[in-house]
Image: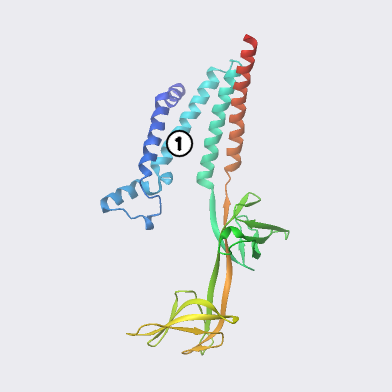
Amino acid sequence: MLRNLIHYTSSLKLTLFLILYFILFLIIVSFIPQTGIDNFNVNPVWLRFVFLFFGLHQFTHSILFILPIAAFILNLSACTIKRLVKKKKEKFSSSGRDIIHIGLLILMTGGSISFFLKHDKNLVFSEGDQHVLFNGDKIGLVSTDRLSGDGNNTENWISEFTITSGSGETHHFRLSVNNPVTYRGISLYQFDWQMKEYVYLKDSQDNIYVLEPGERIVHGDNQYQFKEISTTPYSPTYEAVFLFSREGENPVEIHLKELDDISVFAIKEIKKVKQIKINEGEDPGFAVVVVSFIVIFTGLLMITVKKILFKTGRN
C-alpha cells in the first residue's frame, strides 16, 4: 500500500498538473484585488460572493492555495523518497540531484513556516514613547533628526532607539529608511515620518479635549473645526487655525494662540509632534529558507564538479 501511495503521489503527471494549476490561478487572481473583506468591492454582487466564498480576495490564504501547496510538498517528498530508495547505490552525480531534491523540500518547509507563523505590526513613535516587542522587550524612541535635504522626505530622517530587555540590559541603535536593524530575530524597519499637529482645549470644568486637523468641537450652534497650525510672520509662536461657523452661515477662519478663549473653551496648548513609523517583523522560517539555499547550492556544486571531472577524464 505504501508503494502504491508513493507511486501515485510521485507521479510526474501530478507535478505537471499542480504547476499548470498554479500558473492558471496566479493569472486569474492577478485581476482580482487582493485585500480584506471590508475593502473588497466587486460588482455584480453575485461575483463578489463567489470570490469571497472561494477566498480569491486573499488567494494565498485560501483553501484553493493551501491544499495544492500541501499536495505539491507531498509530491516532492514522494519523488525524493523514491529517488533515495532507488538510487541509493549510485555515484556522486546522482547524489547531487538528490541533495537538490532535499533542498527543495527544506525550502518548501521554510516557506510553510513563514506563511503560517510569520507576523508583523506597525509601531508609531513620538519622542519618549515606548512599545513592547514580540519577545517582551521594550523599545523606545529617544530622538529623531533630519539628515539632509527636504525634511518632508522620510529617507532624510534618522531615529535613535533604545531596547531594554527583561533583565534590564539596554541596547542603542539607529534606524533610517533602507537601513533596517535585526534584534534577536526581530526585524525593525523605519518606513514613514510625519509631523502631527494637536491643539489641547480646556473647558470651564478643566476637562481636556485633544483635536487633530479636521476634527471639530461644538458648543450650542457654534462649531469650531481645527484646520492646522501656523506660525506668525515675525514670531515662531504657534497659532491654531480654526474654521468657525454657525448653522446656515459660511465658515470663517480664525487664528488663536495659547491661552486664547473660544466660547467656553481655552486654548491650553498648541503642539507639533514628530512621529516615526516602524515595522516590527518576526519570521521563524527565514533561517530554514537560508539553509535550503545552501543545500541546493551544494547539490548544484556537486553536479558541476562531477561534470568537470568527467570531461577532464575523457580528455
Q: Nearer the viewer, residue 89 or 199?
A: 199
Quadrant containing the N terminus in the rendered view: top left
Rendered position, 39 above or below 233: above
Q: Position of residue 84 (x, y in %)?
A: 55, 21
Residue at horizontal 50%, vertical 22%?
Answer: 82
Count all numbered tags in the image, as a single digit. Answer: 1
Left/right of residue 202 with respect to residue 308 in the rendered view? left
Q: Is residue 55 visible?
A: no
Residue 122 appears in view: yes
The x and y percentages for residue 263 are: 46, 89
Residue that lies at the very extreme toward the front in this rendered image: 234
Find the residue positioned furthest to the top: 314
Seen from the viewer's position, the closer of residues 14 and 203 is 203
| Secondary element at tag 1 | helix
Left or right: 168 in relation to 33: right
Locate residue 156, reporting x and y percent: 60, 60
**Label 1 is placed on what type of residue?**
Ala
Which residue in the protein does label 1 denote? 70
Vertical placement of residue 172 versus 217, above or below: above
Occupied quadrant, residue 154: bottom right
Q: Is residue 169 positioned above or below 70 on the image?
A: below
Residue shown at the point (59%, 82%) measured from the top left: 234
In-front residue for pair 188/272: 272
